[in-house]
Amino acid sequence: MTDFFLIAIIVLIFLVIFQISKASEYVSILKGEEKSRKQNNKINGFFMIAFLIAGLIGVWYCNKLYYPKTLFTQGAASVEGKSIDTMLWITIVVTGTVFFITQILLFWFSFKYQESDKRKPLYFTHSNKLELIWTGIPAIVLTVLVVFGLKYWFKFTSDAPKTAQLVEITGHQFGWEIRYPGKDGVLGRKNYKLTNPAKANPLGVDWSDAASHDDIHVATTMHVVVNKPVKLVINSQDVIHDVGLPHFRMKMDAVPGTPTTMWFTPIYTTAQMKEKTGNPDFTYEIACDQLCGRGHYTMRGVIIVETQPEFDAYMASQKPEYYKAFPDLDPDKVAVNDSTSKSVAQNIKK
Amino acid sequence: MNNDEVIHETPLVVHDLGHEAHTHHHKETFITKYVFSQDHKMISKQFLITGIIWAVIGGLFSVIFRLQLGYPDQTFPFLEDILGHWGKGGKIDPEFYYALVTMHGTILVFFVLTAGLSGTFSNFLIPLQAGARDMASPFLNMLSYWFFFLSSVIMFSSLFVQTGPASGGWTIYPPLSALGEASDGAKMGMDLWLASIAMFIISVLLGGLNYISTILNMRTKGMSMTRMPLTIWAFFFTAVLGVLSFPVLLSAVVLLLFDRHLGTSFYLSDIVINGKILPNQGGSPILFQHLFWFLGHPEVYIIALPAMGITSEVISVNSRKPIFGYMAMVGSFFAIASLSFMVWAHHMFVTGMNPFLGSFFVLLTLLIAVPSAIKVFNWLTTLWKGNIRFTPAMLFAIGFVSLFISGGLTGIWLGNSSLDIHLHDTYFVIAHFHLVMGVASMFGMFAGIYHWYPKMYGRYMNNTLAYIHFWVTIAGAYCIFWPMHYEGLAGMPRRYYDFSNWESFKMFGGLNEFISVVAMIVFSVQLLFIFNFFYSIFKGRKVTTTNPWGANTLEWTTPIRPGHGNWPGEIPEVHRWAYDYGKDGRDFIPQTEPVGADEQRH
């Protein structure tokens, strides 16, 4: 019933607007079209300046409401992110200035030079001087922006520092898998044809590579160390995903068949960020930023930034994936097996 | 002006006389006049009306998915009535949400803002403003429309298949679009999408070749290239862009079809999906992105250039002042058109493309801001010291400039790779391209429709409705897209069905609801425009003078309702450029008037 009333009201509003519009057309014919045209011109001219003022107030009000919700207030959580924020501010100042000047001129001119019987429009076809000015100035300003932008771009797309912690992250519909290289610092080889979740090998690790034997695999949550560069090797198993890290200002696609990399240096631990933002639920989230199917919006990962001792303790508590695939070789279990087999042998001797 | 035209000043009679004078050599039936017409004016109306129908569908889709975004925790039982199993329990299925998003993009970019904008106005204005009886090949021109129609039929039918239409985004990146296992939309719907776009490409090529050859070869006597109105220059560069870039999309489409059905591996490598290990190795999904954006970026300018051309013309006519810096305008069209072929990879900074390669694209992308700035400053100077008449077309042209500034400036952010790495695929991008290309080009289209409606139908549209249409739309467009910049700066990703489980993005619930409400209001005001459009075809105020806006260009020297062939007598000769407004104390001097002996030079 409410649906019906809603539709009825909308139709009614349409009818009223239409009737008013039709009536105003008749009135304009009665009044003389030229006269009513000039009247309309005045009204629209006034709206131009009103729209400018309302618009500027709107811009201010929108900023007041939503600026605190952007990431600027908490600042970038990585060294590289800080330079991106600097770049953002430079760009905001430049484009903001142009925005206000041109919009104000546009609506001010529209208002000021609305039709008047007294004014003769100026016959002004071109001016080389003016055109040189507004070709030259933008060109110079843009060069500055390009230079700054590329300086930062090359800085954080260059090779990661040698000291960087290596972590592999693999996307699939719809989740993230994290793999750490273990004590040897080398990730074991992978071959997607070996993928076999039933045999505890969901990532297709090639166990014949000894480097894989101490690799640790966990789902969803990545642990990294504060103030230490971390280098992500990014994979995808099925379609394109994207490792989006808004707090660190970083982003890189996960492409099946083409591993990509990205590195950054986190500067606040998760605990520090909870204090900084005043939000006890704060987490660094990994958001998939490339449409990957019906569950795209649920493809969430978590990064926990912690101190080195906390990280070491965490790593010590994890078991290498190799031993999940081959429980028989697990040293903990092997120790047990050894002792039982020894006692069996002794029993036989006896 | 010859005698014929003086007689034809009076309406209606004119129409019939003009018509008889020029149609004696081919009898017109309903079919040849309204369906398989070869008259460029009728073809242009066919493009326009098909475009309007698509715009309603595409716009409605956005309203439906805005319901989900604005009210993620509510149900709307009527959705189940209209969408069936896609809206079970009054809630849109995520798969269908992505299908709606995909179709909204595809429809608006290709069917509305390419076919509906360039198709309509290139067809309508090129022969009329350049001084030709019709296109170089009226038959190919007709085919161009009918291939578009076929493409539309295929795309429309994809909305009704069991597994739904394509749902991988309008950019249809493989492997998501290549593998039926990856999503429902990548099944039958994707094949229909690809077939439809292939037909569409044929349509664009047939149209584009026609536009180019007509402009180059069929201008009337005296219409040198530098005397052409800027609209024609814009359509010329648009057609060149289309002809050079759309074939590349066709190649991407064909290779994708091969990957889907013939077991090739152009875009596929190392894939495990649903536990199935695929044999494909050695392909690269990034290859597809290169091919796609090689069209995709020029496509943005295929959409924007006609709107810029229309805006230039409308602003000059209604400021009663010559366009400022005509040659700079032509030059900047040329610069934008050429640069647009060298910037495609700025859509791919974070796709794993070599970052060093990316740096060239940063440089070239930011270079485009220079010709764009020239255009804006020239429009502003055209308004300066003018005598502005706020016709509905003029309002929309001014609105175009405003939106183009707002959306264009954020291009400087996104084109800079070190900012793009943060803003890529967030709401910031949505705000940017909707303002600069979506809404702005719609405004260009509205300006064109209001300005040339009297020429198309011999009647005016209702002014009051037009004013309401303009003010609500521009205020609404800013209310919808301006706050989205803030969501983007918070890192909020686009193409998310629901944000409520995300600690980082859930704080914008109220704003999303506000945006959805405004979107619905703006959509209903567009319905008002459509009503005005169709109502005025039959009931609008009649045009009583051949040149209602006091414009210089040639289309206003034809009878009020020109027949096939446009001019009843000889095609008029052109003696001057199109922008002699306010010269030597005269309001306007039509292009057909010979240059006087003591006239001032410009």
Image (tube, grey):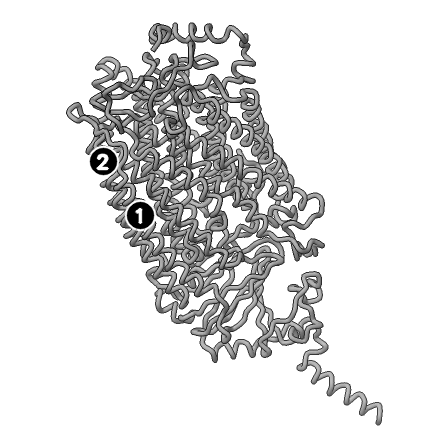
The disc label shown at residue A316, or none: none
Tell me the amino acid under the disc marked 2.
Phe
Asked if residue B205 is positioned above or below residue A166 in the image, the reply reads: above
- Chain holding disc 1: A
**Residue located beneath label 2 in the image:** A109
- Left or right relative to B281: residue B403: left
Query: Is label 2 in a helix, a strand or a loop?
Result: helix
Q: Position of residue B596 (x, y in %)?
A: 26, 18
Q: Position of residue B460 (x, y in %)?
A: 35, 18
Q: Nearer the viewer, residue A25 or A13?
A: A25
**Residue located beneath label 1 in the image:** A136
Asked if residue A170 is positioned above or below residue A104 in the image, the reply reads: below
Identified at 52% across, 16% down, the residue is: B34
Tell me the amino acid under the disc marked 1.
Gly
Q: Position of residue A294 (x, y in %)?
A: 56, 49
Q: CA distance from mark 1 to mark 2?
A: 24 Å
Q: Is residue B462 visible?
A: no
Q: Nearer the viewer, residue B282 or A179?
A: B282
Q: Nearer the viewer, residue A3 or B246?
A: B246
Q: Is residue A142 visible?
A: yes
Q: Residue furthest left?
A: A118
Categorize mark 2 by other alpha carbons within 10 Å: few (<14), some (14-19), many (20+).
many
Q: Residue furthest right?
A: A349
Identified at 46% across, 31% down, the residue is: B55
Q: Position of residue A108 (x, y in %)?
A: 22, 37
- Left or right relative to A349: residue B217: left
